[in-house]
Image: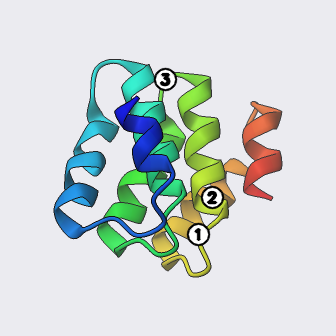
């Protein structure tokens, strides 16, 4: 319920962004997926947060990787390191990730 409420907000305060970003490293993949989804709904994210979302492109769980790629695809500007991480996914064996990255 709380994750859904966050997803609906287009501009979260810095403190909330930091808390959601921290959930990207949670042991439960459902929590990581919800965090990436909530962050992907933000109109603009700080570079550190974008890098944290991009790191989830390497997640063990396919759903988390997909949501992370989708979250990044909605950002209007991405730093070079994030673009490189996305580019590495274009030929990823998981075709869903590659298609979102494209």
Q: Earlier in the sequence, mark 3 or mark 2?
A: 3
State the SS at label 3.
loop
Q: Quadrant of residue 52?
A: bottom left
Residue located 83% across and 47% down the image: 99
Mark 2 neighbour class, 10 Å CA radius: few under 14, some 14 to 19, many 20 or more = many
Q: Is residue 86 above or below residue 100?
A: below
Residue beneath disc 2: 86
Residue located 58% across and 60% down the image: 72
Instruction: Decide if residue 48 is on the left or right side of residue 33.
Output: left
Q: Which mark is residue 19?
A: none
If the image is split into quadrants, where does the N terminus sit?
top left
Instruction: Decide if residue 49 is on the left or right side of residue 16.
Output: right
Q: Is residue 66 above or below residue 30?
A: below
Mark 3 neighbour class, 10 Å CA radius: few under 14, some 14 to 19, many 20 or more = few
Which is more toward the observer, 38 or 97?
38
If the image is split into quadrants, where does the C terminus sit?
bottom right
Q: Is residue 96 above or below residue 7?
A: above
Q: Position of residue 12 (x, y in %)?
A: 33, 65
Residue located 46% across and 44% down the image: 36
Disc 1 + disc 2, Cβ < 8 Å: yes
Residue beneath disc 3: 60
Q: Earlier in the sequence, mark 3 or mark 1?
A: 3
Instruction: Report, in whole angstroms, how far the alpha carbon at label 1 lies from the one at label 2.
Output: 5 Å
Q: Position of residue 48 (x, y in %)?
A: 30, 67
For the image shown, how many numbered marks are present on the structure? 3
């Amino acid at each position: 319920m709380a994750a859904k409420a966050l997803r609906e907000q287009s501009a979260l305060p810095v403190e909330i962004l930091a808390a959601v970003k921290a959930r990207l490293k949670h042991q439960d993949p459902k929590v990581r997926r919800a965090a990436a989804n909530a962050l992907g709904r933000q109109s603009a994210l700080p570079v550190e947060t974008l890098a944290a979302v991009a790191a989830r492109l390497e997640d063990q769980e396919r759903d988390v990787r997909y949501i992370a790629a989708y979250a990044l695809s909605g950002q209007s500007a991405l730093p070079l390191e994030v673009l490189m991480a996305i580019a590495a996914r274009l030929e990823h064996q998981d075709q869903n990730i590659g298609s979102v990255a494209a």
